[in-house]
Image (cartoon, grey):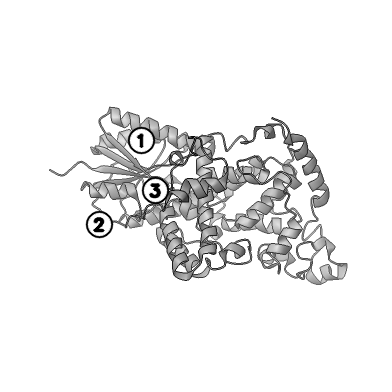
Amino acid sequence: MSPAPIIIWFRQDLRLHDNPALSAAIQSGAPIIPVYILDDENAGAWKMGGASRVWLHHSLHALNKSLSGNLACFSGNAASIIPGLASATGAKSIFWNRCYEPWRINRDTHIKSVLEEAGITAESFNASLLFEPWTVKKDDGTPYRVFTPYFRRGCIGRGEPPAPLPEPKKIDFAPPPKNAGNVDSLNLLPEKIRWDEKMVQYWTIGEAGAQQRLKDFLEDGLHGYKEDRNRPDRENVSRLSPYLHFGEISPRTVWHAIRQRMIAENLETDGDHYLSELGWREFSHSLLYYNHDLPENPLQKRFLAFPWHKDDAALLKWQRGQTGYPIVDAGMRELWETGYMHNRVRMIVGSFLVKDLLLHWSEGEKWFWDCLFDADLANNAASWQWIAGCGADAAPYFRVFNPVGQGEKFDPNGDYVRRFCPELAGLPNDVIHQPWEAPPLVLKQAGVILGKTYPLPMVDHKAARNVALAAFQATKNLE
């Protein structure tokens, strides 16, 4: 008599390599039933945005191919679907890898208790983080609120994270549930305007694409990473964030690959800076785990009284990349075209929104949530609070990015701006980041008509900075 099947519930672990839940199930000798559930009901306000759904569609197709077409897909409340699947298939065990968003934790805790009451084994594993939040605390048992000691003492001070697990050589599948759908039945792609078609051309989505992206970064991007990671005109960032978010590659795999290359090629400085980026991802998840309202409320409560503006017209100009500041506009257009934005430019456009326009950081958080392929609740919330100055280990309130200076420093030849703001391509380097300073003849020769072919600056940065500083100063001493 064959053993009862084990249901493998895929979530944000859409891979075979270094998948602890999958490996444990295979080692048990039981046949498996791989399942994916699109659970918008429990996600509520934080159900996946449009870009994330597009990525998920292609990632699930890639996973299904790796699983020889055996992925069973469902849409609805996982708290009802999972027990029902166990009953319908005769499964006595359900394995999954843990997620850390508050709504997922609450849902999964409930599901586990329901299954255990029914005599069904529910086992969960860590596949998404190097160090889970409850394992990293200060000596007094409280969570860290500052990144550097969190990462240096709390994480890597404890030693190397575990090595990644190998990809299984063979998987035995049990028959799928009779009512299972396929990936297309989830209806993840846009129905009318196919804005996604150009966007996905920039990526190879899926586990194989993640492995290739890591390989390319190790060969072409890691050397010089410390300095060139700030240059949006260069290819020195890994672009692994969406793959990590959807679990097409594990942070353990990335960590150990970076460590090996650091040692082999004497890239300690560059590698250490990249590992600290993985550390910020870990820190963000820790912040969310211990502060469930992180996506909605500032960690520094005095910012509840901050005099944010409400200006839908200004927000729309920012969203569309029509602010009149080329580096800001290039970033917002990169986001819309590719589903991604260079990290340095994320800081620039974030500073412009919350400090030049004095719009609430949550407006940026929501826009990124809908437009980013790598939209991650922990990273998105923690990073927006950082740039707004109201989070843990945040940028000081008086740090206001000058969009002209940032453009001139990090895109000195204007290559990034020319790529995403082609109407400015004919301008010389010395004025491309401030076209309003160009002489009339230079503008004419470049085919630029300010206010028509490219907008004039929507605010005066110097004046806006002074207003922001006054507002932040008034808030500084509030409790």
Q: Nearer the viewer, mark 2 or mark 3?
A: 3
Residue 180: x percent and y percent? 33, 43
Secondary structure state at the residue bearing disc 2 = loop
Q: Nearer the viewer, mark 2 or mark 1?
A: 2
Along the horizontal axis of the image, is 28 left or right of 381?
A: left
Whole-Å distance between the Cαs marked 1 and 3? 23 Å
Q: Within 10 Å of the Cα at label 1, are there few (<14), some (14-19), or many (20+) other Cα atoms?
A: some
Secondary structure state at the residue bearing disc 1 = helix
- Residue sitting at the far left: 1
Q: Is residue 345 above or below residue 80?
A: below
* Residue drawn 80% across the image and 50% down it: 459
Q: Earlier in the sequence, mark 1 or mark 3?
A: 1
Q: Which residue is mark 1?
A: 81
Whole-Å distance between the Cαs marked 2 and 1? 27 Å
- Residue sitting at the far right: 440
CB within 8 Å, label 2 to label 3: no
Q: Amino acid at mark 1?
A: Ile
Q: Amino acid at mark 2?
A: Lys
CB within 8 Å, label 1 to label 3: no
* Residue drawn 41% across the image and 49% down it: 184
Residue 401: numbered disc = none
Q: Which residue is mark 3?
A: 127
Residue 401 makes an appearance in the image: yes
Residue 170: numbered disc = 2
Secondary structure state at the residue bearing disc 3 = loop
- Residue sitting at the far front: 139
Q: Nearer the viewer, mark 1 or mark 3?
A: 3
Residue 60: x percent and y percent? 40, 52
Q: Earlier in the sequence, mark 2 or mark 3?
A: 3
Q: Within 10 Å of the Cα at label 3, are there few (<14), some (14-19), or many (20+) other Cα atoms?
A: many
Q: Is residue 219 above or below residue 249?
A: below
Q: Earlier in the sequence, mark 2 or mark 1?
A: 1
